[in-house]
Image (cartoon, rainbow, N blue to C red):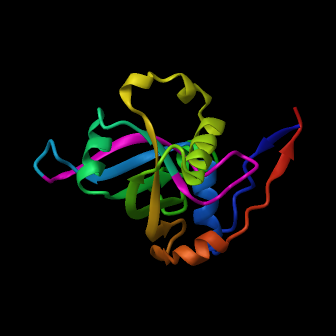
């Protein structure tokens, strides 16, 4: 059997919903303070992972290069926000802007990891598990694993306003995966 992301949690379980949406996602929009736009906001679509489908860590890992504006921006100002939508996951039945279509914004410092460290190796393995083509990206472009140290989480997944999710609650939320028959 193939491993699949866990089922969509109830919207009232905010920390679990945020953790699920991160794990079910493979890309999002990462907003940085741009160097090429004189300090104005800049968002870029980036691939991301929190681990293999059967090993959600909740950590936000990216594979970036300073040849791209996002990596370059983070080398000067590491604070960033990652925005994820439930729409690409395929479980949203409403318009992506409708409050019932979940979205989460996670903010914190995004820093390059030492490739030889245990953290760097875990991040690279988690990224390659979800994005195997990354292994073949040009080595001369300086791609490296980065990790966001989550400071704030803002979740909107139902009517009634957004929820602030504490990072400790997010990390404590336990995903239960299920098998999908081939």
Left or right of 138? Residue 119 is right
Residue 45 x/y as whole percent: 39, 40
170 shown above or below 5:
below
Q: Is residue 49 magenta?
A: yes
Figure quadrant of residue 121: top right
From this viewpoint, which residue is outermost toward the left?
A: 38
For the residue pair 162 and 21, the one nearer the viewer reads as 21
The span shown in magenta is 39-60
145 shown above or below 156:
above
Q: How many discs appear?
A: 0
From this viewpoint, which residue is outermost toward the front?
A: 116
For the residue pair 93 and 13, the one nearer the viewer reads as 13
Left or right of 127? Residue 40 is left
For the point 59% across and 56% down, the residue is 21
**Quarter occupied by the C terminus:** top right
**Viewer can see residue 14:** no
For the point 56% across and 58% down, the residue is 59
59 shown above or below 89:
below
Residue 117 x/y as whole percent: 55, 50
Figure quadrant of residue 140: top left
For the point 31% across and 43% down, the residue is 70
Left or right of 161? Residue 136 is right
For the point 63% across and 41% down, the residue is 125
Q: Is residue 101 magenta?
A: no
For the residue pair 51 and 10, the one nearer the viewer reads as 51
**Quarter occupied by the N terminus:** top right
Residue 90 x/y as whole percent: 62, 43
**Viewer can see residue 151:** yes
Residue 174 x/y as whole percent: 73, 67
């Amino acid at each position: 059997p193939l491993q699949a992301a866990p089922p969509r949690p109830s919207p009232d379980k905010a920390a679990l919903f945020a953790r699920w949406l991160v794990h079910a996602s493979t890309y999002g929009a990462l907003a940085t303070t741009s160097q090429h736009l004189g300090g104005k906001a800049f968002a870029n679509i980036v691939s991301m992972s929190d681990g293999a489908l059967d090993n959600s860590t909740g950590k936000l890992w990216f594979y970036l290069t300073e040849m791209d504006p996002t990596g370059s921006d983070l080398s000067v100002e590491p604070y960033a926000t990652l925005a994820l939508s439930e729409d690409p996951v395929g479980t949203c039945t409403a318009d992506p802007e409708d409050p019932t279509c979940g979205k989460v914004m996670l903010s914190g410092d995004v820093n390059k990891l030492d490739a030889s460290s245990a953290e760097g190796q875990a991040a690279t393995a988690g990224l390659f598990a979800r994005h195997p083509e990354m292994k073949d990206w040009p080595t001369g472009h300086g791609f490296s694993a980065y990790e966001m140290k989550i400071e704030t989480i803002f979740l909107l997944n139902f009517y009634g306003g957004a929820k602030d999710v504490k990072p400790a609650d997010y990390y404590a939320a336990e995903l239960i995966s299920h098998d999908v028959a081939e």
